[in-house]
Image: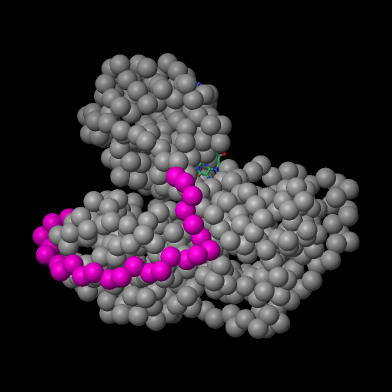
Amino acid sequence: MATLLIAEHNGTELAPATLSALTAAQQIGSDITVLVAGAEAKAAADAAAQCAGVSKVLLAEGDSLAHDLAENLSELVLSLAGDYSHVVAPSNSVSKDAMPRVAALLDVGQLSDITAVLSDAQFQRPIYAGNAIATVTSKDATKVITVRAAAFDKAAATGGSAAVETVSAPAANAASAWVADELSESERPELTAAERIVSGGRGVGSAENFALVEALADKLGAAVGASRAAVDSGFVANDLQVGQTGKIVAPSLYMAFGISGAIQHLAGMKDSKVIVAVNKDEEAPIFQVADYGLVGDLFDVLPELTEKL
Amino acid sequence: MKVLVGVKRVIDYNVKVRVKSDNTDVDLSNTKMAINPFCEIAVEEAIRLKEAGVATEVIAVSVGTSASQEQLRTAMALGADRAILVESEDGAEPLNVAKAFAKIMEQEEVGLVILGKQSIDSDNNQVGQMLAALTKRPQGTFASKVAVDGNSVSVTREIDGGLRTVKLELPAIVTTDLRLNEPRFAKLPDIMKAKRKPLETKTFADLGVEAKQHIQLDKVEAPAARQGGVKVGSVDELIQKLKDEAKVI
Ligand SMILES: Cc1cc2nc3c(=O)[nH]c(=O)nc-3n(C[C@H](O)[C@H](O)[C@H](O)COP(=O)(O)OP(=O)(O)OC[C@H]3O[C@@H](n4cnc5c(N)ncnc54)[C@H](O)[C@@H]3O)c2cc1C
């Protein structure tokens, strides 16, 4: 039994989600190889080699691996998968794109977004926006798995000294080409890695008003999040959406302002340690999951909080 | 160019699902069912391509029980030209669904497949990617913009850090994200007309697909409920609680 863990990284550093997925991999079995793929990823591979419990690191660098094109990344993983019983990745927009391709090419099923490892074949995963938890067993020889990072503690990034081996990058798929990125630039912590999150919903009313949410976030060193309604209305960028179909977060503190608490939003944040909700409607469903609820107008509460903290 | 769209019958997104008391599955008896919201967006996008003269025919395909005919009729009321139901038990596995779509894609000589990025019941987010791999065609997942231009399609994708645009040669597979479009509602005369549109029924065997079991469902449980919290009366009280009780600031 051996596991291939596909790292999430930015070329120089591992994403915290990689360390959470490493914990899941350690619960599956002890022989863990980490694959670090990208246009340039040497520094990230060196970081992976330092992680506790990693036996080997494979580094694949090449133009075909720039921009995370799933057609190319899945070919790379497929070419390595034969040596492993488990192929694991943290759940993110790259693995969601590429891993089902790997599974299909191996003619196996995929276990998406696991939240618990019960054995090397049995896992738990949320279904119905987290309103039910399924226990599932994979019948396949190779188990292709994505891991919900928020459900696992981070493994130690130090203590290991694995060897880094180079593997070749696949040829680029001629039918798929990268054109452009429009990435959000922000000095604030990344949503899925943040210890604190301040989120705004439709109640915030406009992109300008979101400055109130941002001011509190900055005071707390927090990331900014949003409901779908806030994103759809153009108050903030799409990558700030928290929920069933956005980012899944579980920070120590999640503060929701002007968010009603629809099933789909709760699916993304209800595992946060402490939840604060501010809403002018005392019947808002968000209060059912909030540890501390304050019925009030966010336009009064937000500035007062920011000032007094 | 023919456009194929996927339509899955799922619980209505406003309904909170209950788990069966014997923990074998969720309880969908007497539950309001609907088209998976992401599939609705896929249908809408395909219809817009037809209205723009890009698509010549829109074929809606569902893999599911015969009850899924209802959602296929809705898709035709919205503007799909015809429908194919691949009859299967409830909860067909993504890989088997993808294999069925691959066969239909080949038989129908489809130029573009548009599927929802995930269904709100199983939350797998797999079929489109699997279909692309099986047919060796490129994919544009989590699309917030789709523009067909001659033999290729540009897809703007919602990714973790923002947006990314890729260009794919046709035939290609696109999966929809929430902001691709706002689906229309079916009008009564169109609902009547849809009853006369062709709906063909097939089985996995008809398509030459062997539906294997890859993932076995052992148990379904309700998630741990959160302890009810308290209401605070003022910002000062909130700050005090966060500092002294929760110790998070
Ligand atoms: C397939 C699908 C997927 C979805 N995925 C997601 C997802 O990933 N994430 C997500 O968030 N949603 C998602 N949704 C949408 C979800 O169903 C809700 O529509 C959305 O979460 C509502 O956002 P909201 O709470 O900001 O808006 P609303 O529900 O409109 O709530 C606004 C709240 O603000 C309060 N308010 C207004 N003004 C003030 C004020 N001045 N002070 C205080 N409170 C105020 C109101 O009382 C109200 O409770 C999805 C929906 C579908 C169909």
Q: Position of residue A236 (x, y in %)?
A: 47, 32
Q: Residue at x 56, y 36 (%)?
A: A232
Q: Residue at x 51, y 45 (%)?
A: A264
Quadrant assignment, res A119: bottom left
Q: Is residue A167 magenta?
A: yes
Q: Is residue B156 magenta?
A: no
Taking the image as drawn, is residue B246 in sight? yes
> Does A134 appear above or below B183?
below
Taking the image as drawn, is residue A123 in sight? no
Left or right relative to B94: residue A122: left
Q: Quadrant of the C terminus of chain A?
A: top left
Q: Nearer the viewer, residue A209 or B113?
A: B113
Left or right relative to B16: residue A200: left
Q: Nearer the viewer, residue B25 or A215?
A: A215
Q: Nearer the viewer, residue B73 or A41?
A: A41
Q: Position of residue B211 (x, y in %)?
A: 58, 80
Q: Position of residue B121 (x, y in %)?
A: 56, 58
What range is drawn magenta here? A155-181
Quadrant assignment, res B94: bottom right
Q: Residue at x 59, y 57 (%)?
A: B174
Q: Residue at x 84, y 52 (%)?
A: B191
Q: Quadrant of the N terminus of chain A?
A: bottom left
Q: Nearer the viewer, residue A21 or B80?
A: B80
Left or right relative to B99: residue B226: left
Q: Position of residue A252 (x, y in %)?
A: 29, 40
